[in-house]
Every structure is written in C-alpha cells, then in structure tokens.
Image: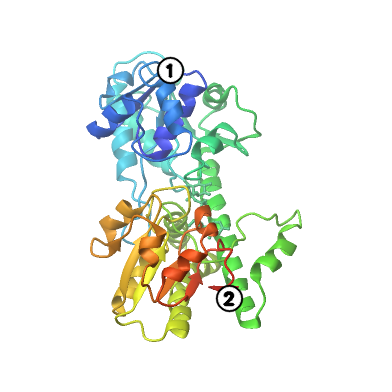
Amino acid sequence: MGGGYVGLVSAACFSELGHSVNLIEIDAQKVKAINLGRPPIYEKGLEEMLRAHAGRNLTATSDYKCIPDSEIILICVGTPQGPDGEADLSMIASCAKSIGIALQNCDGYHIVAVKSTVPPGTTERLVKPTVLRQSSKNINKEAKGPQNIGFVMNPEFLREGLAVQDFMDPDRIVVGSSDQNAGDLFMGVYVGLDAPVVRTSLTAAEMIKYTSNAFLATKISFSNEIGNICKRLGIDVYDVMKGVGLDHRINPYFLNAGAGFGGSCFPKDVSALIHLAQETGEEPILLKSVVDVNERQPLRIIQLLEKKAGDLAGKNVAILGLAFKNDTDDARESRAIPVIAELKKRGAQVKAYDPKANSSMEKIFPNIDYCSSADAALKDADACIVMTEWPQFGQLDKEFDLMRSRVIIEARRILSCKDAEGICW
Ligand code: UGA
C-alpha cells in the first residue's frame, strides 16, 4: 500500500524476486503510468524492472479488493513531519483501517507489515488494534484459537537514487514481529537475497530505523562541525576525514562535510526522534545539536559568498544543483532551499540549473530563473554556488569563464577547477 518511492521500489523488487505483487496507490495517474511500465519518479534501474514485471506479476491498482487474497500486506505510505516535529501517522491509521475492513469475514492467515518509518510503538499500539478492531478478529484477548493476523515491522534502508540496489543487495534485513510464526513466514518475501537478518520485537525494529538515520545524520553534522573548525585553521577537512575514516571502527562513509543533509528522511526522522524523546521526558542534547549544525550550514555559504562578492543586492548568482543530493530529481528539504531564500532576501538575482530537479524546485520557488544547462546559469553571473554533488559538475572549468567574475563557492566537494573555495575546505 502506497506507491511512493519506498512502496514502488519495494513492489518492483518483490516482483523481481518472483512474488506476485499488487501495488495499491490512490493516485490514478500513477497507477496508469506504473501499469505501462513507466515509473512516476526517477530511480536508477526501476524502469527496467517495471517494464519486465508490469502487467505480469506486478499490477498497480486503486482498489482494495486484492487485500483478502494477499498473504502479506505491506504498509509503505508516508509519515510526514507534523507541526511540532512529530511524525504524522494519519496515513498509517487510514491504511490500517482499510486493511481491517478488507479483511472482515475473510478466512486464512494474513500478515500486516509496516515498512513506513514510524515511531516505536506505532505498529503495536495503532496498526494492530486498528486492523483487529476493523476486521473484528481477535478483539477479545482471551479468545482461543489461532491468531489469524500476524504483525510485522520491516524497516527500509533505501537511499533515493540507489533504492533498487539497496533493496536487492542490503546490508541487513530487520524484521520485528508480534510472534515467531509471523516473522518466520514473513521472511519468505526475502528468499533469494543474501544478507544478515536481525529478528526483533516490533518496537525495536521501529527504533532501529530511527537510530540508523539519526546516527548517519550525526556523522554528517559531526563532519560539518569538524569542517567548520578546519576552515578556520586552513586545513582541508577531506584530508582529515580520509585519515579518520580508515579506522574500521569509524568507516569512511557519511563523513562528507558541506552543505548538510536534506531529503525526505533525515530532517524529518531526526525531528521525530527529538519529539519522541521529549515526550518521554528525555532531553536529546546531541540530536538537537545535529539539527542545529545542519540548519546553520547553509548560512555559512551565504557568509562566505558575501565575504568574496560583497553586498549581494542586485548581484547575479548562479546555483548549480537543486536536488537534495545527486542522482535524484527530489528537492525536498534540499539545502539549496535555505540558500536561495537567503539570496532572495538579500536582493540577489538567482539563476539555477539542475540536471533533474529544476521542475521540483520550481514548485518551491516559481520566480527564479531556471536554466537548461550549467553554461546558461553561469553566463554573466557575479558568483556561483555548487549545491549538489552531481558528478558532471566535476568536469566544469572553462564554463566558469562565462561568468562576470570567477567567484565560485563549493558547498559539496565535487569541482576539480583550481579557484573554487569550499565551505569547509
Ligand atoms: C536516507 C538513508 O541513507 C537511507 O538508509 C534511508 O532508508 C532513507 O534515508 C530513508 O529513511 O528512507 P536518503 O535520504 O535517500 O537516504 O539520502 P542519503 O544518501 O542518506 O543522503 C541524505 C543527505 O545527506 C543528502 O542531502 C546528502 O547530500 C547528505 N550527505 C550524505 C552529506 O551531506 N554527507 C555525506 O557524507 C552523506
């Protein structure tokens, strides 16, 4: 249930593993596109998979009729950030209700599995009672007989852009279950994948997901803080992290300093964990600093720009990269958003180019100048900021001569030309 990037990638990959998959999505246009083998989002390798399986063992539908015949029902809907940083569980609740209604008067054993990122306790305290109440099954805890609905929490660890690869070749598979039998049966969906399996309670599985994302976000903010210190000392933080990351206890991943983390997951999940901790009476000092460092990083870019280019009012600033990272058209929580907002506030003219995310950013900033190439954005610019680590930006050099002056700021370490200045290097 849910044809967003997690639901769609999971559906495609489960069909690749040989299962018969129904993807329930309420957006009729998405359903149509998926059934034609056309992914509504860009994700490496997804189109090939959809073309191979759509209309065969993968069908998208807006109808809940397939639920009673499904052995496993996976909830993959979004849990967006609520007004106080908490996770908004309304779509989870509505899915659980629909599943319960669809399972009324229905025989046989079903597993309801949550793949969405949800706060610990959600599967046990929201999904399970809602499904059971709506389906009228096992309401009476004292009732004898086999439990005919099992509950599983199976978090995803899919990076956007690399989601298909992460699904098919995972570091680990985490399965929390209401009982041993539900977990054992659920593991059947992953037959064919070779990865360590962690079996836990429902709540521990939910917490594993939050903790993983919070730890990765912490690594990034930590690197940014070290990078900010290095910048003052005239040290290249990338040299430092190379030396640090070779320690196997640390590892070299997610130590890239720069503009900070964006996307639909880290900012939302760290906020939700902070909210959750505070609800329990625990003050999450470290997690709050992780967010704080991340929010200040884009302002440092503006400060560096002002130092190099002076007053920004009336200046032409080229932004290269709008997506929250390379290989995606997603601009949600992109670090380019606060940077563009600050530039506009200071009266600068913004010309922007992204290989894939121009139209995503246009929804957020309809009134800036979107260009179809890096050259077009750079032409006559007084300054340029590289905001996304697209590998093709690494080739740019003489293109910067199109600018009025070569003031180049790198907020992600990607350029190879000599005169760019990095935000923390
Ligand atoms: C993240 C996690 O990496 C996935 O494991 C998880 O499943 C997913 O969230 C989710 O919860 O669904 P994603 O948001 O797609 O995946 O992107 P990442 O590749 O993790 O990057 C997040 C942000 O951190 C990007 O803005 C990226 O530029 C930034 N980043 C990443 C850095 O600033 N430095 C780094 O060293 C690495």
Measured in 3D between alpha carbons, the distance from the residue under mark 2 to the one under mark 1, in whole angstroms, is 51 Å
Report the disc number at residue 408.
Answer: none
- Give the residue drawn at x 58%, y 76%: 228
**Residue type beneath disc 1:** Ser
Total numbered badges shown on the rendered structure: 2
Figure check: 329 above or below 134: below
Query: Which structural element holds mark 1?
Result: loop
Q: Position of residue 255 (x, y in %)?
A: 62, 60
Residue 2 percent across, percent down from the top left:
34, 35
| Quarter assignment of residue 98 | top left
| Secondary element at image label 2 | helix
**Who's the residue at 55% across and 66% down the image?**
221
* Of 24 and 205, the residue lying toward us: 24
**Label 2 CB less than 8 angstroms from ligand 1:** no
Numbered circle sitting on residue 228: 2
| Of residues 383 and 413, the one drawn nearer to the viewer in this rendering | 383
Q: Are marks 2 and 1 in contact (CB under 8 Å)?
A: no
Characterize the local packing of mark 1: few (<14), some (14-19) or many (20 or more) Cα atoms within 10 angstroms: some
Name which of mark 2 and mark 1 comes first in the sequence. Answer: 1
**Residue at mark 1:** 20
Residue at horizontal 24%, vertical 33%? 29
The reply to whether residue 143 is visible in this rendering is no
Q: For label 2, count other residues whose C-alpha is less than 10 Å away and answer few (under 14), some (14-19) or many (20+).
A: many
**Residue 285 appears in view:** yes
Q: Which callout, 2 or 1, points to the residue nearer the camera?
A: 2
Is residue 191 placed above or below 172 in the rendered structure? above
Q: Nearer the viewer, residue 192 or 383?
A: 383
Q: Amino acid at mark 2?
A: Asn
Percent of width and height locating residue 141 = 41, 28
Which quadrant holds the C terminus?
bottom right
| Quadrant of res 219 | bottom right
